[in-house]
Amino acid sequence: MNIGNVKIDGLSALAPMAGVADRAFREVCVGYGASYVVGEMASSKGITLSDNKSTELLTVYDIERPAGIQLFGDDPQTVANAAVKAMNFTPDIIDINMGCPAPKISGNGGGSALLKNQKLAQDIAKAVVDSVDVPVTVKIRTGWDFDNIVAVEMAKRMESVGVSAITVHGRTKVQMYSPPVNIDIIRQVKEAVSIPVIANGDITDGKSAAKMIEQTNCDLVMVGRGALGRPWVFSQISAYINHEIVMPEPPVSERMMVMLKHIKKICDYKGDYIGMREARKHAAWYIKGMRGAASFRQEIGKLEKMEQLEELAYKVVVQSKQEE
């Protein structure tokens, strides 16, 4: 598929998860076959004020291309100005967040709050499209709540102002991440517009990805929480869709090796102090579902050095072998 003039080889993308989809995680996911990645959302106001954190959020590296950067905001000119400044980081695509349900975003008029003000959302998208020469995409939810399902109308508005693709998370803002995912609305969006539609929500393996594609006819699936501690999910999706092969979860030893590689990247890019503190959430995701995970999480909460993580990984592997 193509998003504007950007070719996407494959059927699965990494979602722009705040606090997760940083450079290290994007690189690991690309290594497992993610065909497109979007970085953590960045504040348009912060970018226009040259906030130092924005540089880290916006930087795109060749190893992860094609890659997009995501902006959020509630003022057309501010978001457009941020997009222009963001072009200094050479993104392949600029994505606008119109679906984040977090109170600190939606409570200030950005993210999913734009689902309640479609004219403003349309004005923001148009301002960005008119300001940059790369494809602009938008990520939305089905609506604010079950009484206000607006995804189809939003998608039409976005297409009318030149947006190149739209991602639909199949839940309302009020749902947050609770079931169910409204697959039917994603299908309706796909039928209503001619631009590519990317489906997001509860895609955790090859079968769930194939089901989403079959039932919605979407052009791409986007994986968010299903990739936490499981970057190999992109390989599983590719194997099932292309060859109908169900790839099992990797053995514990491999999972621990991936975890160590991933967290070492975080430390290399952010320094040991920040890296090891961020390692705590990632390590908890990598061991999720394993026998003894609860006791290991106590150790994870105290991680300060890479050597401690290596020792923990060794213990996890030893315990798994004793159970075989």
Image (spheres, rainbow, N blue to C red):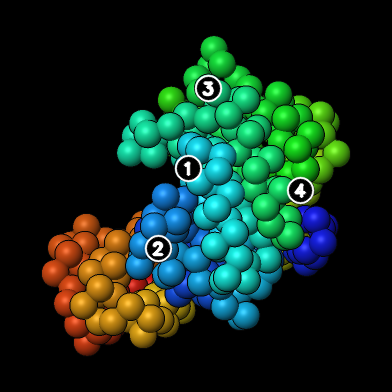
**Mark 3 vs mark 4: which is more N-terminal?**
3
Real-space Cα separation, disc 2 to disc 1, in angstroms: 15 Å
* Distance between mark 1 and mark 4 Cα atoms: 19 Å
- What is the crowding at mark 4: few (fewer than 14 residues within 10 Å), some, or many (at least 20)? many
What amino acid does circle 1 point to? Gly
Using the image, tell me which numbered label, if any, was put on residue 50: 2
Q: Is mark 3 on a helix, strand or loop?
A: helix
Q: Quadrant of the C terminus?
A: bottom left
Q: Quadrant of residue 15?
A: bottom right
Query: Nearest the camera: 22 or 237?
Result: 22
Q: Which amino acid does label 4 sit on?
A: Ser
Q: Which mark lies nearer to you, 2 or 4?
A: 2
Q: Which residue is drawn at 22% across and 87% down?
A: 307
| Left or right placement of residue 248 versus residue 318 in this view | right
| Mark 2 and mark 4 residues within 8 Å of each other at the beta carbon | no
Between 295 and 47, which is closer to the camera in this rendering? 47
Task: Tell me the amino acid under the disc marked 2.
Answer: Ser
**Residue 322 in sight in this render:** no
Q: Residue 95: give x, y in percent of width and height.
A: 61, 51
Q: Which residue is identified by label 3?
A: 116
Looking at the rendered structure, the number of numbered marks drawn on it comes to 4
Residue on which the image places disc 4:
164
Q: Which percent across, then down, holds residue 68?
A: 61, 61
Q: Which of marks 2 and 3 is nearer the N terminus?
A: 2
Q: Is mark 1 on a helix, strand or loop?
A: loop
Look at discs 2 and 3 and give the one toward the viewer. 2
Local SS, label 2: loop
User: Nearer the N terminus, badge 1 or badge 4?
Assistant: 1
Q: Which of 86 and 312 is in front in this view?
A: 86
